[in-house]
Amino acid sequence: MTRTVWLASYPKSGNTWLRMLIANLSATDRPADINDLPERGGIASARGPFDYLTMIDSGLLTHDEIDALRPRVYEELARGAADDEYDQPADAPPVRFVKAHDAYTLTPNGEPLLAGARGAESAIVIVRDPRDVAPSLANHSSMSIDEAIVFMSNEQAAFCSRLDRLHNQLRQQLPGWSGHVASWLDQADIPVLLVRYEDLQADTLAVLRGVLAFAGRPADEEAMRRAVAFADFAQLRQQEQEKGFGEAPRPWAGGTFFRRGESGAWRDELTPEQVARIEADHADMMRRLGYELTSARLALTG
Amino acid sequence: MHQSKAGQPVHFYRVAGLAVASEIELPGAIAVPRTAEPAVTIRAAAVPAVLEGATKKGATWQIAGDRFLFQVPGVARFLLSGGREIVFETAAGVDAHDVSIFLLGTVFGILLHQRGEIVLHASAVRVNDKAVLFCGASGAGKSTLAAALAQRGFSLVADDLCAVTLAEGTAPTVQPDGRHLKLWAQAIERLDLAERRGAPVRNKLQKFFVEPAAALAEPLPLGAVYALREARPPHKPGIERPNVVDAALILRRSAYRPQMVNRMEQKADYFRAATTIANAAGIFNLTRTLNFASIAEVVGWLEQHWLDIGLTEKAA
């Protein structure tokens, strides 16, 4: 029986990179095609599997009505129901890694949106320094860095939440960067492995090894080494430049997904005021995750 | 609004080619004169929460023999029997208007699957004397494209649900699903259709009925089927004819409720239908950027393609 593990993160925090690393475990002589990944569990907020399994046209439901039904969908998928969105691989891998940007929230009926232990066995929670998330989010969502900083502090923020149109994905609640990370780290339904983007970058092989051990997805050392080389950031960006990436925002406008992928680039991308604002908004969670604040005063007063 | 005595259907419609007698009004459906022997009846009565003897169960549905229990939580429960009868029980505080939109869509679609029909999730317009279908899941842009074509003078045939009748020796035939488009507020604004905007599809939604300039109530032979795709790598913009294997997969995935194809063991039926439709009309991928700015260009591709495949002729 295939087990389900969430790859949970705030947007632009390395979720796709980790997914690419895992997908490349089965690549042997060349990197996996970023537009045709062999191990793909999709994203929790995909509309297709919801409509397929409930047989309800989600375009006729409100965001809250959809949320009330989402736990049923994850329970079914965790039990092995086909979602018809993706081809089912002939020999299913032992673990189904599913990307999720949703915060760990409760539905209007008071149950976990992602169905708690019935929806997945565990979660790998990927976090990234919010000072690096802000410029990346601005690029991804076509907003200014200041707007991204406001979005990251807004407890009512969400993706795909407009009321006048049908988004390609279901609504994803993103109640501020701190609130999002806390929702995953503080839930008690399923075990969590915390992965920092910066650590993944500093020693990709060691972190990948830890992730796979936690998830119970066996892989030999050689396969892991190859995956690290195949899913190198420069390699992913080159594939995107050559062929485009189906998950990039606004492909018709030439928007790119893989941007800089660096840690600490905020030092030349943010103004001192922007740095101060982010640190003021998220001081507690930054300290909790070991992200050093630039301002001693802020560090003291939070 | 008609008043009905208990158990007395007072509204008569033709939905996907079937005569329907309903206790409640179904806005947007094609009204017809009273029928003595309707193929399908719709009435309000108590519906159980659990179906005894259910052999298959999903998140919102249960199947026991020829009975199918389906629920939209917070709206209504529906019991479909033998592909002939739909009984519904409305949740507390929900008005009939909210129920009718699900009755005409999902519930009728499931009923058609129950009857073994080929039923596609598609909008359709009339091109010359044939129906051209645009298939896709929710959000694929079916209604928006049909609305843009209706503005160019192509009559609306269907907005959401297309039943296709296949009979030996004749061309596949498409049954119309109603007289209205259903469009989101953003699409109505961007297509400049505010004057044609009607009531909201549900009171809670910014999605509205829109009356096209012309809509057909009669069946038409099938002219072409296009599967709508967004132009995202690896899919490039344009119209292409997939190979026969892919065409069969496209048609099965374009079923109104693909899971019903599996549950009702209709895979072979859809494979045969795909072969027939591919030969008689053609199944194509229509890949385009999913934004309003590109619609005029896409309409241009289609008009050229209809010349190329002989659906239309060049004006003399």
Image: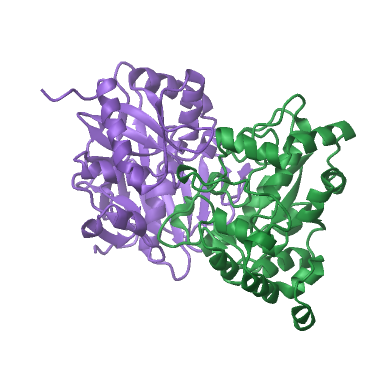
Chain colours: A green, B purple
Residue B299 higher or lower than A196, as above or below: above
Of B132 and B235, nearer the camera is B235
Residue B132 higher or lower than B27, as above or below: above
Quarter of the image where the C terminus of chain B is located: top left
Q: x, y (%) of residue A266?
A: 68, 61
Quadrant for residue A90, please give it.
top right
Of B270 and A130, nearer the camera is A130
Residue at 64 percent across and 59 percent down: it is A102
Quadrant for residue B5, please give it.
bottom left
Residue at 30 percent across and 31 percent down: it is B302
Which residue is at the far left? B316
Quadrant for residue B307, please give it.
top left
Of B93 and A269, nearer the camera is A269
Of A5 and A156, nearer the camera is A156
Q: x, y (%) of residue A73?
A: 62, 51
- In the drawing, does residue A123 fall left or right of residue B167? right
Q: x, y (%) of residue B234?
A: 54, 32
- In the drawing, does residue A18 fall left or right of residue B54? right
Residue B299 higher or lower than A115, as above or below: above
Residue A157 in sight in this render: no
